[in-house]
Image: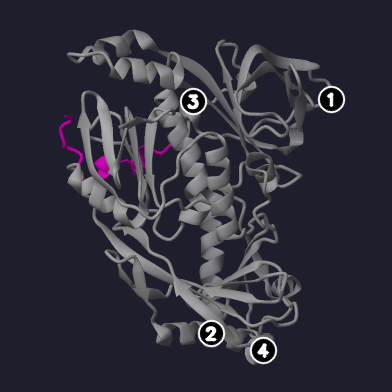
Amino acid sequence: MRLSKFGFIFVSTLSWSLFRSELIHSQTTNSQAPDQASVQNSVPSPLPAQDSSARTSTWQSKDAKHVFGFPDIKANKKGTLVLSADSLTFTGKSANTSIERHSITAVSAGDERVELWGLTGRILRSAIPYNGSMAASAVMHHRIDMLTVEFRDKKGGFKRIEELLDDACGFESHGQVLVAENDAEFDACRVRVAELNALGFTHEELIDGPELRRLVPAVAESCPGGVVSRRDGAADPARTTTAFRRKAEALGATVREGVAATNIRKQDGLWHVDVGADIYAAPVLVNAAGAWAGRIAAALGEPVPVETVAPMLMITSRVPHFIDPVVILRGRKLSFKQFANGTVLIGGGHLATPDQDRNETVLDWRSLAISARTVFELFPVMRSATIVRAWAGIEARTRDELPVLGPSARHDGLYHQFGFSLHGFQLGPAAGAVMTELIVNGGTQTRVGDLGIDRFHPSTPKI
């Protein structure tokens, strides 16, 4: 039997991606929260502007801990946080950096429940016999003040992916454009943007025909406009996944591939998983097995209404450069992106038939033909291209198309992270960061409570 050196077992399909990190979490142990930035219940609120007569230093904490997201500062570094009329500055022993005041878009304040000694404390507590861990929990937890600041990163939110993984992952940020093909679809775009603005979101903009053709010059003249998210981007999935795996192994993780994780059980306070001829044991188990995670959850007494789906993609022959952003349609199933070598990746939601037991798919060539024909209709430059290859991946889609993310409602030390419903490449790393906080700190400032597995069976008693 092998005891996990990290204290947890991660059962996964190893499906990771990039995420935009425009949040800094400043973790402080004092209570000197600035009045102008205090927000109840961590609800984002605009940060008030200050005139030139404001004090040089409006607030500071000499006992701050940077969690993640501050430019050029590594995670979990301690230092001094200063909010002045011009900027928010974090100064550590080896580095310092600032965010200009006008680039801050929102702040939120609250507290977080944290276990003493982090993961080590959780392991020690789980080893106490006769349910003694419950009593120990009362004295091994404390609350710390949290400050979350949202800001516009001039260098681009993905710039730190190379610092994290030592690989740029083929990331490009040219935005994403949703194209309306007629006036009715353009009206629907207008309603969507208005609803987002009413909720406080401004990342999507309504654009008219001329702006659409400036961003996507090759689009058909009949399209009246659409929506743009200018900060969106794309990365190479295979390269990104490999980079995450390589970095995890460099940090000491063991990755077992091509073999099933079976006979999952909890014995003597540890989770045990059979992986081929080996047995792994740890106090924490993360069920992140993608399309197969529903089976694991059901076997552990927490069934989830989840289905296996297989979205299809295809790649074309090379054509002259005609587009930079990722393009999707408002009315028809289509998304596509052109790569630097001239090839075009076409997707959009058409599904193949999955065989989950054999990990294989059967492509629906008629639906692929529909996607190809749609591209040819909207972009005449594509009419000379041919389809080079097509494939499909196997994913999990929940009934409400929202992921399952958080602790088990039934078992201590068990966490679920699956069911991203065709958005896993986008959300995977951010979800992983939240999962880390849940496991190590016992809580997170990110509001993920409604994504818990208990939404499907809220009355399940804990074992």
Dot 1 or dot 2, earlier in sequence: 1
Secondary structure, mark 1, is loop
Quadrant location of residue 451? top left
Residue type highlighted by circle 3: Gln
Instruction: Read off the residue under disc 1.
Output: 52
Dot 1 or dot 3, earlier in sequence: 3
Q: For residue 65, say whether it is visible.
A: yes
**Which part of the image, by quadrant, shows the C terminus?**
top left
Q: For residue 113, say whether it is visible.
A: no
Instruction: Read off the residue under disc 3.
Output: 40
Q: Nearer the viewer, mark 2 or mark 3?
A: 2
Query: How far is mark 3 from mark 4, CA to CA?
Result: 53 Å
Residue type highlighted by circle 4: Pro
Please name the predominant secondary structure of the magenta segment in the image: loop
Query: How far is mark 1 from mark 4, CA to CA?
Result: 55 Å
Instruction: Pick the residue in front: 41 or 355.
Output: 355
Dot 2 or dot 3, earlier in sequence: 3
**Magenta region, residue range:** 447-463
Query: How far is mark 2 from mark 4, CA to CA?
Result: 12 Å
Query: How far is mark 1 from mark 3, CA to CA?
Result: 28 Å
Task: Tell me if mark 2 has few (under 14), some (14-19) or many (20+) residues whose alpha carbon lies within 10 angstroms of its own.
Answer: many
Secondary structure, mark 3, is helix
Instruction: Read off the residue under disc 4.
Output: 380
Q: Is residue 454 magenta?
A: yes
Secondary structure, mark 2, is helix
